[in-house]
Amino acid sequence: MMQYKTVSEIHDAFDRGETTPSALTQKFLDRLKKSDHNAFLTAIDDRALGQAKAADEVIRTNGGKVPRAKMPLLGVPMGIKDALCIDGVRTTCGSKMLENYIPPYTATAVARLEAAGVISVGKLNMDEFAMGSSNENSAFGPVLHPTHRDRVPGGSSGGSSTAVAADLCFAALGSDTGGSIRLPASFCGVVGFKPTYGRVSRFGLVAFASSLDQIGPLTHSVEDAALIAEVMGGFDPKDSTSNPASIQGLAAEAKKQIEVKGLRIGIPKQYFIDGIQAEVREAIESTLAELTRRGAKLVPIDLPHTKYAVSTYYVVAVSEASSNLSRMDGIRFGVRPKEAMEADSPTEFYKRVRKNFGPEVKRRIILGTFALSSGYFDAYYTKACQVRRLIRQDFENAFQQVDLIATPVSATTAFKAGDKAKDPLQMYLTDIFTIPASLAGLPGISVPCGQDQAGLPIGMQILGPRMEDVRVLQAANLIERIHGGKA
Ligand code: GLN
């Protein structure tokens, strides 16, 4: 791992004159271009170096010191998942459909980070339209795991997790609809934070399933995850689902030590099932044992509707996706190949445009269209919304008795590339532990808590009640300290 573990260490190094934003940016640009992980789809050279130069200048005119209060992320090189728009920078969303799309605006999350000094060094590979768990669904080829090349990095933000773990950028943005930040973070051994739904504006994020999508950071430390979430989060009038509550002070609060004595940690029996890899179970249990030694209380809880979560998600998510992706019609958005222009009917035109979607995206559009069709709407979509309410209610009931919930992120460590790619149902089940919190809109984090015998990272998931992001971050901070203070 590179010599700086946190943003604060980078800023100390800038203050000492040990390095500069320009030097650091150049270093990451060189590394990301040399890497063969396929984590980046686009390197952003000139724009990034321009931002870096401006950051050098800010430090110079501030007496050689970083103005931390005003620019809390000054000179920090980040990778941005290619689902987020940056004005003038190609944004593909991992799809042939948007292969040459250059958006005329920047996502709020990215704009806020850049205003705080972030340098966007490149756009990160991902599963097409964020549909997947292994990053094998990108139209631009799979992303390799940072250390074990025969393994998947997790998806859909696999470019983000590999890039951070392999030091191709210092931190990254991902998006999480059913686990796409937490799962890849756990497979690659970095921190992945999904804030409460609505805390980070979705404006400028290519929509997959709007009632679930949430942007979040992947980082080396919990401290940085909190900092990035605070800077990019908070109300945004451009997103109608944006939560009006202030997010100010999140990073400072997250740094405070959690009162572990008497902390009630819920252990849902539905998440500690047979079939969990033994080493994953042991890593989670030994971390929990250490928490109890420090005074926490483990409380068995029941989340009875968990077994319906994956099916519910795959009705809600595909329904929303089929609607959201209808704009990729070659007229409003999406490629318009010459052969489509030569079509002799609108139907033929659409066919020639929409065949540019990959197989997983097509499957979901078909499923979603079916679920929303008249005659089936109530049986599928309405029913799924009702079950979603029950799942949310399960969590609300549990949080009457506990402060937080601890679970594995995934039943196994990173699996072999190709293992599940042929069987969509097997792939869908990898998200079994992350999807329920997405349906309920809860804040969740994946924090490294060990390794298996092959040296593959294991992640622990901490979930909190809605808007209790601070509590989740504080607990993750403690777990990070237990495991040696490094992510
Ligand atoms: N793997 C899940 C899916 O394929 C979740 C993806 C995500 O969170 N974007 O839908």
Image: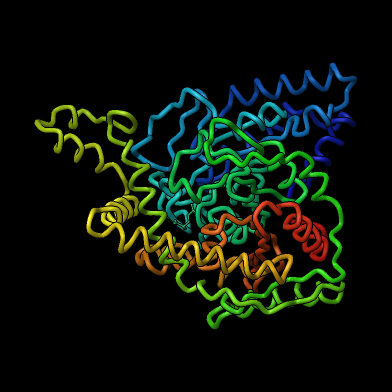
Question: Left or right of 137: which side holds 294?
Answer: right
Q: Residue at x 53, y 45 (%)?
A: 39
Question: Left or right of 429: which side holds 348?
Answer: left
Total count of labels = 0
Above or below residue 274? Residue 455 is above
Depth check: 294 or 97 in front?
294
Above or below residue 486? Residue 53 is above
Question: Left or right of 295: which side holds 184?
Answer: left
Depth check: 31 or 334 in front?
334
Q: Position of residue 236 (x, y in %)?
A: 60, 33
Q: Residue at x 62, y 75 (%)?
A: 268
Q: Where is residue 294 in the image (x, y as percent from the top left)?
A: 87, 72
Applied colour scheme: rainbow
Above or below residue 473? Residue 259 is below
Q: Is residue 228 visible?
A: no
Q: Which residue is drawn at 41% across and 47% down?
A: 128
Above or below residue 485? Residue 44 is above
Depth check: 413 or 319 in front?
319
For the C terminus, the image quarter is bottom right
Q: Position of residue 120 (x, y in %)?
A: 62, 32
Depth check: 228 or 427 in front?
228
Q: Position of residue 479 (x, y in %)?
A: 78, 63
Outermost residue on the left side: it is 344
Q: Is residue 21 visible?
A: yes
Outermost residue on the bottom side: it is 274
Question: Left or right of 403: which side holds 186?
Answer: left
